[in-house]
Amino acid sequence: MDSTAGGPLADLLRDLQLIFGDRLDAFVAYGRPDAKPAASLAVVASLTSEDLAACARRAGDWRRADAATPLLLVHQEFARSLDAFPIEYGEILDTHRVLFGANPFEGLSISAEDLRRACEVQVKSHLLHLRENFVDCGARPSAVASLVIDSAPAFATVLRRLARLDGNAAATATQLGVYAASRAGLDPRIVGDVLALAESGPSAGVDAARLFPGYLSSVERLARFVDAWRAT
């Protein structure tokens, strides 16, 4: 158990303990430790509509405290959904910090083929949405900038998952850029700018609108790469 269960998740944890009592098996934080709102997941022995209503009454307080609404899963639901959400749940497995109870993810792992297939779906969906949304926004610079900034976190996530699929931890943005350039042939400057936007948004100091053509080309190349992916 992580004894540092303070910050925005402290009150959330206390509320969940009041709502679920001894049915709360585990509570974990995940994602970047400094992220706002703070992300979390609760594993419970059972979950009723009354439980959801009790959580709903407290949701406003959680949001005001910079805590996102927690994912609520009944015991074994996470393990049984790894094949359905290998990217999203892979991020949780990699970044989780146990704040209460035993580690609910002990011994769990993501299938390489499940992850490869999910990466292919996400990259190709990302590509289609970039093209569609660019046309829909009329190519207005401000709208294009918002499109790039809003989509950057999803790009960063799938790139991290591909690196993990290749057995590359790529813990930092620099390492991820090196991986993207050496393994997938992406322009490291473009990748670096997109990753900076994923981390810092508009404050990254990147001209997001001007970045769009290179970003789109990178996603196109990444789609071809994952389509033909073979383990190194």
Image (cartoon, rainbow, N blue to C red):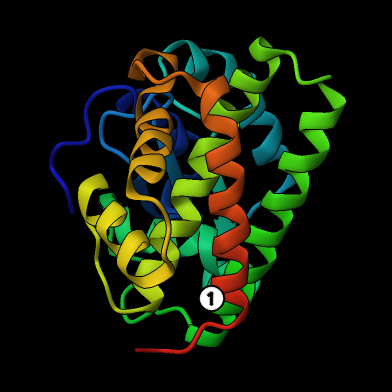
**Visible in this render: residue 16?**
yes
In this rendering, position of residue 229 left or right of residue 179: right
Quarter of the image for the C terminus: give it: bottom left
Q: Which residue is mark 1?
A: 115
Q: Going 35% across and 78% down the picture, which residue do you hit? A: 166
**Visible in this render: residue 70?**
no
* Image: 23 above or below 10: below
Q: Going 66% across and 22% down the picture, which residue do you hit? A: 144
Quarter of the image for the N terminus: give it: bottom left
Residue farthest left in this picture? 3
- Residue 29, by quadrant, is top left
Instruction: List x then y, in percent, for residue 112.
Output: 48, 84
Instruction: List x then y, in percent, for residue 212.
Output: 59, 32
In this rendering, position of residue 138 left or right of residue 194: right
* Image: 126 above or below 77: above
Instruction: List x then y, in percent, for residue 118.
Output: 62, 70
* Image: 108 above or below 100: below
Q: Going 66% across and 26% down the picture, which residue do you hit? A: 56
- Residue 147, by quadrant, is top right
* Image: 65 above or below 46: above
Three-letter amino acid code at the position of disc 1? Leu
Front residue (pair 35, 231): 231
Front residue (pair 46, 211): 211
Instruction: List x then y, in percent, for residue 50.
Output: 71, 38
